[in-house]
Image (cartoon, rainbow, N blue to C red):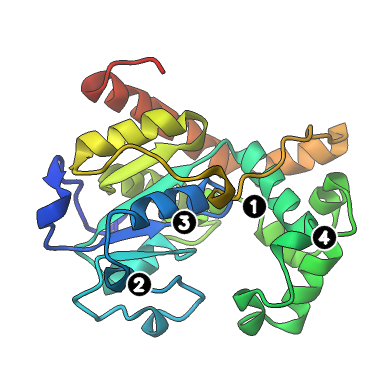
């Protein structure tokens, strides 16, 4: 079976939902902004702790929790919450990769009291601290395994029910994306929020303060041809998934909200 086995239900009413929301936060896809927005619609006691690798630690079996979120794969969270309404955002793969680098490159994003340090290995911490010293070219072209893991088809991996290299890796991600309650596009964030409001009734206007959004800086991306070719090789599935998502997103926008900003 390619799909994880849930269906997109629209529209539904947020105030009377009998199942939780589960936000699959693909790294560097406006997830901080989106989760702050989602949190504004629930009591603090209804929001599960952020996922740091242990599903039991996020009170996955607690029926009082109405919002789960974190960097979990869709197929993994669906095993625990098969009837949840799943949400995610996608981003242009090259821009997502650059944002990943900028996040690691900025030491302010990985302070000594970051809770991730408690669940990371010494090698993983060393990788992030090394990334603070290198250029984007070196980040892309280097041969550190974790650097490649953070770049190669990350969005497809997060949404697929299959492993990289298998025939169903990309098709599964597409099928699962179609089955989700909602997905948005970072480059069309405002329209995405409007689409969400059409799919799940009761969501308010977006009013998250800029200081809570964790936006990356807008310094220009620069790669040599060799670096660009290597990045393109690592993003083949993500680019196809993104093109597919844009097509579906555009169709849904035409069908539910008036186009334009």
- Mark 1 Cα shell of 10 Å, populated few (<14), some (14-19), many (≥20): many
Contact (Cβ within 8 Å) of mark 1 with mark 2: no
Q: How many marks?
A: 4
**Residue at 42% across, 54% down:** 35
Mark 4–mark 1 CB contact (< 8 Å): no
What distance separates the C-alpha of mark 4 from that of mark 1?
Answer: 16 Å
Q: Identify the mark nearer the N-term, 4 or 2.
A: 2
Q: CA distance from mark 4 to mark 2?
A: 31 Å
**Secondary structure state at the residue bearing disc 1:** loop
| Disc 1 and disc 3 in contact, CB within 8 angstroms | no
Indicate the position of residue 119 as horizontal and vertical percent values: 61, 82
For the N terminus, the quadrant is bottom left
Q: Sequence-wise, which precedes: disc 1 or disc 3?
A: 3
Left or right of 239: which side holds 233? right
Percent position of residue 64, x then y: 20, 75
Q: Which mark is residue 48?
A: 2
Give me the residue at 27% from left, 70% from top. Answer: 46
Estimate the x, y position of residue 234 in percent, counting from the top left.
67, 47
Left or right: where does residue 92 sit relative to residue 78?
Answer: right
- Residue at the spot of label 4: 131
Kindly report the distance in space between the C-alpha atoms of the residues bearing marks 1 and 2: 29 Å
Q: Residues within 10 Å of mark 3 (few under 14, many from 20)?
A: many
Q: Earlier in the sequence, mark 1 or mark 2?
A: 2
The disc at residue 25 is 3
**Badge 3 vs badge 2, beta-carbon distance below 8 Å:** no
Residue located beneath label 1 in the image:
152
x 30%, y 78%: residue: 60
Q: Is residue 73 above or below residue 156?
A: below
Q: Secondary structure at mark 2?
A: loop
Q: Residue at x 58, y 48 (%)?
A: 211
Q: Quadrant of residue 73?
A: bottom left
């Amino acid at each position: 079976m390619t799909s994880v086995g849930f269906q997109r239900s629209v529209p539904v009413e947020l105030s009377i939902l009998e199942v939780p929301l589960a936000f699959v936060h693909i790294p560097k896809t406006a997830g901080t902004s989106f989760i702050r927005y989602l949190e504004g619609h629930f009591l603090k006691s209804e929001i599960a702790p952020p996922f740091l690798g242990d599903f039991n630690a996020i009170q996955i079996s607690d029926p009082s929790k109405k919002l789960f979120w974190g960097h979990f794969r869709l197929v993994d969270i669906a095993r625990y919450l098969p009837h949840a309404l799943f949400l995610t955002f996608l981003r242009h793969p090259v821009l997502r990769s650059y944002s990943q680098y900028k996040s690691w490159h900025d030491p302010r994003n990985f302070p000594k009291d970051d809770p991730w340090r408690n669940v990371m290995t010494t090698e993983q911490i060393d990788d992030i601290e090394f990334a603070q010293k290198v250029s984007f070219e070196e980040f892309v072209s280097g041969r550190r395994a974790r650097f490649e893991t953070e770049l190669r088809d990350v969005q497809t991996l997060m949404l697929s029910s299959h492993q990289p290299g298998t025939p169903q890796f990309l098709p599964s991600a597409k099928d699962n994306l179609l089955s989700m309650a909602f997905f948005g596009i970072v480059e069309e964030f405002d329209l995405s929020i409007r689409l969400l409001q059409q799919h799940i009734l009761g969501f308010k206007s977006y009013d998250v303060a800029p200081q809570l959004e964790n936006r990356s800086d807008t310094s220009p991306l620069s790669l040599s041809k060799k670096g660009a070719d290597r990045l393109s090789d690592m993003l083949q599935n993500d680019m196809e998934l993104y093109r597919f998502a844009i097509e579906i997103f555009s169709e849904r926008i035409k069908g539910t909200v008036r186009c334009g900003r």
